[in-house]
Image (tube, rainbow, N blue to C red):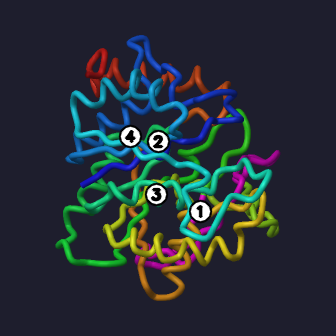
Amino acid sequence: MQLVILAAGMGSRFGGLKQMEKMDEYGNFLLDYSVHDAKLAGFNSVIFVIKHSFYEEFRNTIGKRVEKIIETHYAFQEMDDLPEGFKVPEGREKPWGTAHAIYAARELINEDFIIINGDDYYGQKTYQVAADYLRSLKGDEVGQYVNVAFQVANTMTENGSVKRGVCFYDKDLYLTKMVESSVQRNEKGQVECTPLDGSPSFIVPDDQLVSMNLFAFSKDLMSHLKSRFPAWLKEHGETMKDEWLIPTVVSELVEEGKASLKLLSTPDVWFGVTYKEDKEFVVSSLKKLVEKGLYKKGLY
């Protein structure tokens, strides 16, 4: 089982490269905790998807530690990594999105795998849920995907809105729709979701399941990404801001009957560094987990 970490974003709202901000007194980053927890759950290799421009700095900080405990690879998400016949439109600076980030690792992904964000803490139980699911696959299944989802109240910050994939599902927890939204509490204390596509806002209960971009995929997803990227580029490739997002790809496959996505819930509480003001809370939260004995001092 492979762990794919999407870590190419520079974190504009945070004000810097948030994946490389030290988050404890021992010099560890959130990524260190992610790899530790995934290895504990049974994942045998990690692929960091980063920008080539900060490869040396990344490897000399996070990489050199991680390489000592798990098989480690690097993939580079670059704007010009496009299928033959396509080119980056003049003036575009925004990356192509999360589906493109996974596409960037296409030569390295050869097992069933999970993806995570590089700037989120998911919790040990979350990785165990994902690992148990992948172990349940017999090796020849296709289109059997999972999202390990959180209750929305466990994923919010007091410092502003956050982007979440608000999930709608049937009685068996199979996804029927995912709405990418900006989420925050309104003046009444309700969780208000504003869809990124401009649709009207809506209210959800605190226990509504949302995606934190932790998907577990059978490896056949890669063939879908390779075949669908050219079609997406034909429609969106000349724009300055459109992104090819993995929730969109999965939703399309579900609608076409080519895949199913089941939601598996986790009891863990998320925290991360969406905003610079979040760092203090993250640091204190990790310290409490060390004090409880969930992690040893120094981690590695």
Between discs 2 and 4, the one toward the N terminus: 4
Dot 3 surroundings within 10 Å: few (below 14), some, or many (20 or more)? many
CA–CA distance in space, label 1 to label 3: 10 Å
Q: Nearer the viewer, mark 2 or mark 3?
A: 3
- Residue 126: x and y in percent read 36, 48
In the picture of the structure, the residue carrying the numbered disc 3 is: 102
Question: Height in image: 163 above or below 232?
Answer: above
Q: Amino acid at mark 1?
A: Leu
Q: Quadrant of residue 17?
A: top right
- Residue 180: x and y in percent read 65, 62
Between discs 2 and 1, the one toward the N terminus: 1
Contact (CB < 8 A) between labels 4 and 3? no
Residue nearest the observer in this picture, 93 or 297: 93
Between discs 4 and 3, the one toward the N terminus: 3
Residue nearest the observer in this picture, 37 or 76: 76
Q: Nearer the viewer, mark 1 or mark 4?
A: 1
Q: Amino acid at mark 3?
A: Ile
Residue nearest the observer in this picture, 148 or 228: 228
Query: What residue lies at 27% left-to-right and 61% top-to-bottom?
Result: 110
Question: Height in image: 98 above or below 184?
Answer: below
Contact (CB < 8 A) between labels 2 and 4? yes
Contact (CB < 8 A) between labels 1 and 4? no
